[in-house]
Image: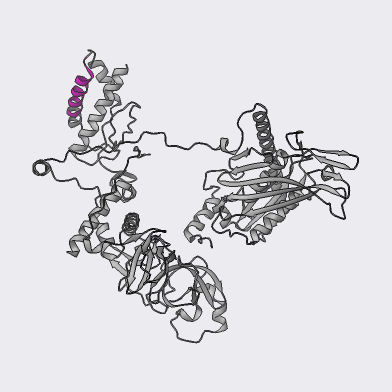
Amino acid sequence: MAVDMRLPTVKNSMSLSVSAAGRKDLVVPGDVITSDTGFMRGHGTYVDEDKLTASVAGEVQRVDKLICVRPLKTRFNGEVGDVVVGRITEVQQKRWKVETNSRLDSVLLLSSVNLPGGELRRRSAEDELTMREYLHEGDLISAEVQSVFSDGALSLHTRSLKYGKLGQGVLVQLSPSLIKRQKTHFHNLPCGASIILGNNGFVWLYPTPRQQEEEAGGFYTSLEPVSLSDREVISRLRNCLLALAAHKVFLYDTSVLYCYESSLQHQVKDILKPEVMEEIVMLTQQKLLEQES
Amino acid sequence: MKDTPLSNCERDFLLKAIEEKKRLDGRQTYDYRKIKITFGTDYGCCFVDLGQTRVMAQVSCELVAPKESRPNEGIMFFNLELSPMASPAFEQGRQSELSVKLNRQLERCLRNSKCIDTESLCVVSGEKVWQIRVDVHTLNNDGNLMDAASVAAISALCHFRRPDVGIQGEEITVYSPEERDPIPLSIYHMPISVSFAFFQQGTYLLVDPCEREERVMDGLLMIAMNKHREICSIQSSGGIMLLKEQVMRCSKIASVKVSEITELINKALLNDKTARKAGGRCGFAESMPQERITALKMDQTSVEMTDVSETVSSIVQTAEAPPQTVPSPLVPVPGVGQIGEGLRNTWGLEEEEEEEEDDGESSGGDSVAEVTKMEKEQHKDDKSRKVDVVEILDSDEEEEEVVILYPETTKKAKNTGSGQKGAATSRKQQKK
């Protein structure tokens, strides 16, 4: 069996110079943001001897008189309309508890799902008893945030044909701050796979379905065997996602695609090596910069 | 904080592996992980490592009034704490179900089995007795906290020394350790708990489950036993149905394991005793292994950057097109896959060259001559060798090029491969 060994080296991490407009004001906990008392303090700050100090590590955001610090590594703070990928942890009376990498488990009410069969009817007691047949513990779902409870827990819904139980694919768990907010989070990548970039940092890669089935409410999961070429594409995409996340590059369909193309010259398993990761991400960042200008 | 749920893939993988009698860390069904017992500088402080599970037990004593119902017996108090250090799922101060279960089992195992002679703890009947307090703290949870806790508790109790007491008439004097040597507790036997995890409704069982295995298990059976094959306590949790034969079998396995562990504890106690007598350093800090990378660090080599553009353009013009990655293996014969062309087998070649090269030329000359010879011979040979030569380079090989086992089908790769081989063979010859 081939073993790859090399001595530890001191790595100088090189990053492409970002344009001047993108200069961010980064702080660490304890950094004084301002000594001016005229500002209102927002999340991530506290007042220490009349000085506004940061309590988390992140970038400073200023909106008129409000200063807050948006942390770089944080749990998912959901807002209405966010697309999330979550895992069912509990089946309770009339609702499911979904784990979405946030501070509290999110809630998926029975009235917020499409029943199999697609009928629009009142939820009966029978539906309550057969909840487990639709979704049970351990299942992955894609859903949208409907509302936020007062304690911060999210209420999800899958009332659209594009949401629902997820079938065969690969889940990659990353930090929520890396996912760029876009108009749509469901993409069919031209390289031969589809991706769901959940706002909560969970990214779902799956083989593109042959024909758009009119699902019975999104609970039908195809168990057909996935071809080897599809599996290779998905594995490569997963490694690319890990490479981009390691170098803190924003994740959206274009960056993922560029990264995939830059990685084609390497073998799938080589992408996980640190030097190859750096190379691929540099190429991606270059392409992204070219595209912007 | 709640534990992240286990994904379905992982759960299925673990269960299927258990069905095939395979465990994640390569152990057999009845194997325990490596147990390491170390004692602190104070008497009564003990650390136990069961694989990655880490537990600390501390024994302390105090003079108190005895219980009304038992005026001439000492008091034993047990406390097991699940600290957030062990796992993010444990919350500080909260009495979770697991903590109650472990506490009850520890109490049953040590108190109800009467392993300590409580009557010897009596100082003045009805007035003053020793209260022995055992605190067990979990430091890291990698499964099977109960076993580690029981081993730690009993080792700490064996290690503990209580202050000597002198009674003169009505007066009681408690001597400090400097005045009189402290006395060990009188321990009749050492009960040790052994845990069995059951899967698939009791079909498969594993001894000493690790954290992942604990997450997918159906039920747990804990048997506390001593080396004289006396069962001190049995507890079954998880609501699985067990057959009588299964329980009997588990108790037999437990007796074997308990005798091994008891021997280990006795050995550790003896080592500690000799170390203290010899005056050597003992304690927790000494027992921590130094984990360091002993290899040298490689400095980044600086690259000559002047006049880069000219050399670059000249190289680009003269170089060939970059190689294409091999998309998928060729299948020359059904059942055989071939990637690349493989390097030529040099075992037979070495003997030929030994006969040829008899003069004592310099090594530099040797390597050059051999490189050219090898290249010629390679070109002469037919292509499509299905043999992948595994090259074992000498340990004193100074070059640090990566040997490509599946080389690309280019001349460049062949050159580097043959160059290395030439160097390797030349060095082998030098030794001879």
In the displayed structure, does residue A183 sit left or right of residue B410? right
| Residue B415, picture quadrant | top left
Quarter containing the C terminus of chain B: top left
In the displayed structure, does residue A112 sit left or right of residue B402? right
The x, y position of residue B231, in whole percent, is: 76, 47
Q: Nearer the viewer, residue B76 or B128?
A: B128
Q: Is residue B388 above or below residue A199?
A: above
The answer to whether residue A185 of the structure is visible from this angle is no
For this orientation, the residue located farthest to the top is B359
Give the residues in magenta. B361-375
Q: Is residue B424 magenta?
A: no
The x, y position of residue A192, in whole percent, is: 28, 63
| Residue A211, picture quadrant | bottom left
The x, y position of residue B281, in whole percent, is: 60, 31
Q: Is residue A144 above or below residue A277?
A: below
**What's the residue at 87%, 42% (across, down)?**
B171
**What's the residue at 51%, 62% (across, down)?**
B5
The answer to whether residue B427 of the structure is visible from this angle is yes
Q: Is residue B363 magenta?
A: yes
The x, y position of residue A112, in whole percent, is: 46, 80
Q: Is residue B131 above or below residue A25?
A: above
In the displayed structure, does residue A4 sit left or right of residue B360? right
**What's the residue at 29%, 22% (across, down)?**
B427
Main SS category, magenta section: helix
Q: Is residue B362 above or below residue A106?
A: above
Q: How many marks?
A: 0
